Image (cartoon, rainbow, N blue to C red):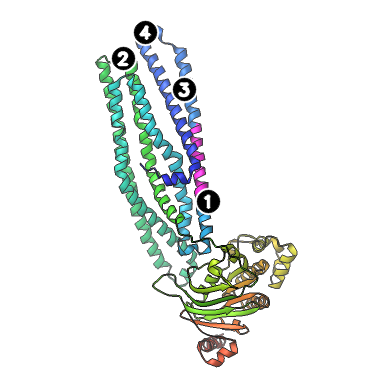
Amino acid sequence: MMINKRLINTVSESKKYIALNLCFQWLSLAANIVMMWTVTAFLGALFTDSNSADWVLTICVSAGCVIVRYVCSVLSAKMSYLSGKTVKIRLRQMIYEKLLRLGSSYKEKVQSSELVQLSVEGVDQLETYFGSYLPQFFYATLAPLTLFIVLSFVNFPSAIVLMVCVPLIPVSIALVQTWAKKLLSKYWDKYTGLGDSFLENLQGLTTLKIYKADEAKHKQMNEEAESFRRITMRVLIMQLNSISVMDLVAYGGAALGIIMAVTQMAKNNIGLSQCLLIILLSADFFIPMRMLGSYFHIAMNGMAASDKMFKILDLPEGEPKTAEVGSDCSITAEGLSFSYDESREILKNISFTFPMGKLTALVGKSGCGKSTVAGLISGRNRNYSGSLKVGDTEISEIAESSLMQNFCYISNRSHLFKGTVRENLLLGNPQADEKSMIDVLSRVKLWDFLKSEKGLDTEILEGGSNFSGGQRQRLALARAIIHNSPAYIFDEASSNIDVESENDIMAQIHELAKTKTVILISHRLANVVDADNIYAMEDGEIKESGTHAELLSRKGLYSRLWDAQSSLEEYVKEVE
């Protein structure tokens, strides 16, 4: 009943803690039996012949049993903690290692918010499964059996009645289990879906405010929250109903045992001390199973979460890639196609060459496939068809670590981490010394500003919110330069910033292009005028390529884009 062998074997280190937990609980039960036997024997002797009642022995044995129970309780709690700790470390490590194996393209298979929820709350639910439910499951089987054996020597009919009633609790749990499993699976679906919506709306809150779409999203989230509330209420109703049934069985069984003991004493089959012993121990028949029922619902929630975890852990990884990027970091594609799903093809049989020592640009309207090309080259997108090579090696055969080391991707959303300028630059090159950091900051025209602050120790708030847009992009560029990759992909890296910052960034991009493979993706065509080669894309296809002058002379796609942008910029200047 709710024993998932795969889950237990996955965290096999916890087995010894579960076994020790069981042992300490059983020793506590044995101490309780000894104490009850001693106390009832004393009361029986006191009732029949007060001179035969041994006060000292009763007090000493009871005190010793209380101490044993206390120590066992502490050690049992410690084993629960160690078991739960082992589970959390192991499962979170497995999920983390799985993501590393899936690589930067993991988002094609699983959502980040679902991963966070399962890794945090889902694993916490499994802590209860391993730390409380499993030890209690075995103890709930062992305790009634132990009590039955003990009470059989006291009064067999009473022991039989109590033992027969015990299985009614697991029967009620089993009846609930199938329904509960389906319900909790739906609960986690709703929960992770609500988490996805919340994270997305939180990240895009500024955009929603700008377009006054926050009210519509607010209404949508209210509907999702209401749906989640309803299924949460169904889970609580299921839990309360099953708990009520288990309480009825537990207390009813204990009452039946008491009635049986009193009846047996009335028939002179047992004495007062035996009757009192049965009455005092009858509750212990049902308490372990009742506790199991209380852990059952939390454990079921953890089991539902574990099913989703295993779906992630079972995601196909493909064969491990072992090829390395060589000294030639030029990029060539022939007949390259790609789609996120079968219904829509993003890239359609395109071919291109990005040589080293040249600046190559990709231009086109939004949605034409430029960033998808960048994603394929950097390894964030996989499962393309056709050929895409770095030097003479197919990208699909290159180890992701080698790809990450040799290709540096910079976008207009490059993340700055909370900390200092020094710490952010050291992410690009952990071996960088202070002089090289100052040099690279000077190259991107940022050092003069930082000198007026705290230099390399200037604090950066979350997301670089205390820096301007241009300063954030300059720092992101400095970090990329100090990484010293053989190849760079600039995806709209100079958009949405001031003209001065844009010019400084473009100057550094041209400098890098003298010795490295540099791909420039830009919606602003003025930035690609001096590129060695320009590919103009439309609807996932490369329509034409050449230098700026060559493409203008052809009067094709690039020329139309150039004329449209030039007219718009002239209009803006006139308005200003």
Q: Nearer the viewer, mark 2 or mark 1?
A: 1
Q: Secondary structure at mark 1?
A: helix
Residue 406, given in percent of the width and then of the height, sits at 62, 68
Answer with left or right where residue 447 lies relative to residue 499: right
Considering the whole magenta stretch, tell me its main secondary structure: helix
Q: Of tags 2 and 4, which is closer to the observer? A: 2
Q: Nearer the viewer, mark 4 or mark 1?
A: 1
> Of the numbered discs in the image, which one, if any, rests on residue 345?
none
Question: Where is 83 relative to 235, above or below?
Answer: above
Res. 514 image quadrant = bottom right
Q: Which residue is mark 3?
A: 65
Judged from this view, the residue extending furthest toward the right is: 435
The three-letter code of the residue at mark 3 reads Cys
The foreground one among 254 and 19 is 19
Q: Which sits earlier in the primary sequence, circle 2 or circle 1?
A: 1
Q: Nearer the viewer, mark 3 or mark 4?
A: 3
Part of the protein shown in magenta: 74-91
As drawn, the label of residue 49 is 4
Q: Please check the rendered image and state whether residue 80 is part of the magenta-colored stretch, yes or no.
A: yes
Q: Earlier in the sequence, mark 4 or mark 1?
A: 4
Question: What crowding class fits label 3: few (fewer than 14 Cα within 10 Å), some (14-19), or many (20 or more)?
Answer: many
**Between marks 3 and 2, how big is the CA–CA gap?**
24 Å
Which residue position is annotated with label 2? 271
